[in-house]
Image (spheres, helix red, strand yellow):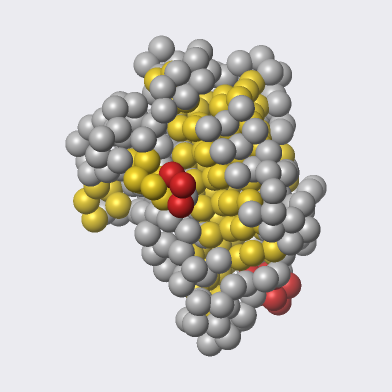
Amino acid sequence: MATTETWDVDAGGAGDYSTLSAAEVAKQADIVAADKVMVFECRSSDSSTDPSSAVFSGWTTDATRWIEVIGTESHGGKWNTSDYRIVVGSAHVVQTASGGGAANFFLRNLQIESTGGGNGVMLQQLPSAQSAVERCIVRQTGGASNVGIYIGIHGPFGLSNNIVYDWATGINFAADPITKQQFAHSNTIHACTTGINSASTLSLQVVKNTIADDCTDGFLAGTGWHADSDYNASDIASDAPGGNSQNGTDTTFVDEGNDDFHLSTSDTVSLDNGLDISGDSDYAVTVDNENTTRTGSWDIGAHQATAASGTRRVFVVG
C-alpha cells in the first residue's frame, strides 16, 4: 500500500515551503516508483497571500498514487482574507501541464484568484487519469476574462461544491470524454458571461444541483448535456438542463453584492429543490462547500442551508 507524504505550505513562512510553486518544484517525482501519495497542505499563519503560479509538471502518478493539494483552513464558504489564498496576475493560477505532466490530481478547499489574464485552474492530462476540483472558491478580480476552471481532460473528472464568479467562462469542459465520466455537481457560478460550458460534441458531461446566476448564458453545450443532467437552477428561461431544474427566476443569496453566495432563508428557487446525490453511482457528494454533511431536503448549489458537522466526501467514478 502506498505511503502518504505530507508537506506544509504556509504562505506566512512557518511551514516547509512558503508557496505551492516552491513545494511542487522541490517534490516533483515519479511517485509510482516511490509508491507514495503526495499531499500538499496549504495554510497562511499570518494571513499572507501566496503570489506564485503553481504549475504541476514532470510527475508520474497512477490511480493509487496521486497528488492532492488541500487548504487546511476553513474559509467559511466566502472569500476570506485571513486564510490561505493563491493570487496571481497574468499566468494561470494553478495548472497541470499538458501531456500527463501531473495526472491523478485533486484540488480541494482552496481560494484561487486571478487579477489578470490567466485561468484560475487549468487542467490538462491523459485520458486514463482521474482528477477532481472540490470545495474551492475561484474568482476573477481583474475584469471578466478567461476561465475559472478549465478542464482539458478526456478522462474521469469531478467538480463539486465550488463557488466560481466574475469570469468570462466560469467552468469550461474543453475536451470530449471517452464515456459518461465527467461531472459537475452542486456548484454555484455567478456573474460570468458563460456560466458552465461544454465544448464536447458527445453530450457526455453530467451537471446536477448547479446554480448559474447573473450569467449571459448559464448552461451552454454545443450538442447538449448528458440526459442524466437535472435539478439545476438558472435565472434565464429554458437554460438549465433537466425536467426538475429551476429556470427563469433568481436565486436569493445572503449578500450577493458582497459575494456571499450562501442561500438566503427566503429563497424559493434553490432552497430545498436539489437532488440527494449522496448515493450517486457515478459521482457521489455528501457534503457542501464548507465540508459539512448535507441533511434534510437538498439545496441546489455549493451551500446547504441546513447541514451538520460531517465527513469528507469521496470521489467516485463508476
Q: Quadrant of residue 54?
A: bottom right
Q: From what the image shows, is residue 179 above or below residue 47?
A: above
Left or right of 311 on screen, residue 105 = right
Q: Name the outermost residue toward the bottom.
A: 14
| Residue 163 in sight here | yes
- Residue 87: x percent and y percent? 64, 64
Left or right of 261 on screen, residue 155 = right
Q: Nearer the viewer, residue 184 or 25?
A: 184
Q: Name the outermost residue toward the front.
A: 257
Residue lying at 66% horizontally and 37% vertically, measured from the top left? 169
Residue lying at 68% horizontally and 39% vertically, measured from the top left? 168
- Residue 184: x percent and y percent? 51, 34
Residue lying at 26% horizontally and 54% vertically, measured from the top left? 310
Left or right of 36 on screen, residue 76 = left
Q: From what the image shows, is residue 119 above or below residue 296?
A: below
Residue lying at 58% horizontally and 51% vertically, measured from the top left? 139
Left or right of 163 on screen, residue 99 = right
- Residue 40: x percent and y percent? 55, 69
| Residue 204 in sight here | no
Q: From what the image shows, is residue 24 above or below residue 298?
A: below
Report the number of discs: 0
- Residue 143: x percent and y percent? 69, 48
Q: Nearer the viewer, residue 176 or 46?
A: 46
